Amino acid sequence: MRGSAPKTWLVIVLAASSFSARADENKSDGGSSASLAPRARIECSLKRKPGEPLDPPSTAAIPGPESFVASQHFREDIAPTAAVKISWLGATFARRFAVKVEAADDTSLQTHVLNKPSSAVQILGELGPRAESKLADIWCLLKLQANGESGALQTSSVPNLFFVRDSMGDLGVVDALWGGAGWEIGASPVGSQRPWTPGTRVFSH
């Protein structure tokens, strides 16, 4: 009986070590939630200052003085005169989002940086109700970096993410990426399993 005691003790120690290693692994993985690190809050306004020309000229037809017609702003145009250089618009974005009309209010957006690969659902789970923003918010930020200047939006190969409701009222993911010649604007369903890479910048209210 004495001879079996050290073996039993060894088995207990090994089992405890294995359990501890698994616990540490699960802890480092962070479970299924996204890992967002908050950064600066950004203030932006689309309201025209006295004496400032309408931008673009076609906005004279906007229904209401404080309305934002997405199709009159989000257009592929990399000419020097473009209000915002946009080199590509995704088909999903054009179909689901570019047809929207929104209120052009002042906005305050919170920036976050993604620390590990996460799906849109995981990011939404962490942000909660404050996740939603508007196309007008995105355009407001784009105007501040119309030619790829540095600012709140990243201009590297890592995307900027927004959660926006489409023309049918369904929440979707809009991503903006500076492609060198202009901004590339895409959209995807919230339920997509695509993992967004670490370093992705996420915007919320």
Image (cartoon, rainbow, N blue to C red):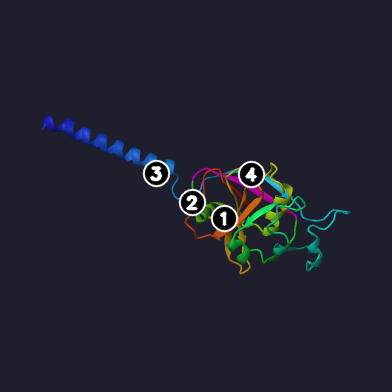
- Per the image, the residue denoted by label 1 is 128
Give residue 195's mark: 2
Question: Which structural element holds mark 4?
Answer: loop
| Cβ atoms at labels 2 and 4 below 8 Å apart | no
- For the residues labelled 2 and 1, the Cα–Cα distance comes to 19 Å
- For the residues labelled 4 and 1, the Cα–Cα distance comes to 26 Å
Mark 1, residues whose alpha carbon is within 10 Å: few (<14), some, or many (≥20)?
Answer: few
Within the image, what quadrant is residue 50 found in?
bottom right
Q: Give the magenta range.
A: 106-116
- For the residues labelled 2 and 3, the Cα–Cα distance comes to 19 Å
Which residue is depicted at the point 61% across and 69% down?
168
Which comes sooner in the sequence, label 4 or label 1? 1
Which comes sooner in the sequence, label 1 or label 3? 3
Give the amino acid type for the residue marked by disc 4 in the picture: Thr
Q: Nearer the viewer, mark 2 or mark 4?
A: 4
- Per the image, the residue denoted by label 3 is 26
- Per the image, the residue denoted by label 4 is 155
Give the amino acid type for the residue marked by disc 2 in the picture: Pro
Q: Nearer the viewer, residue 44 or 130?
A: 44
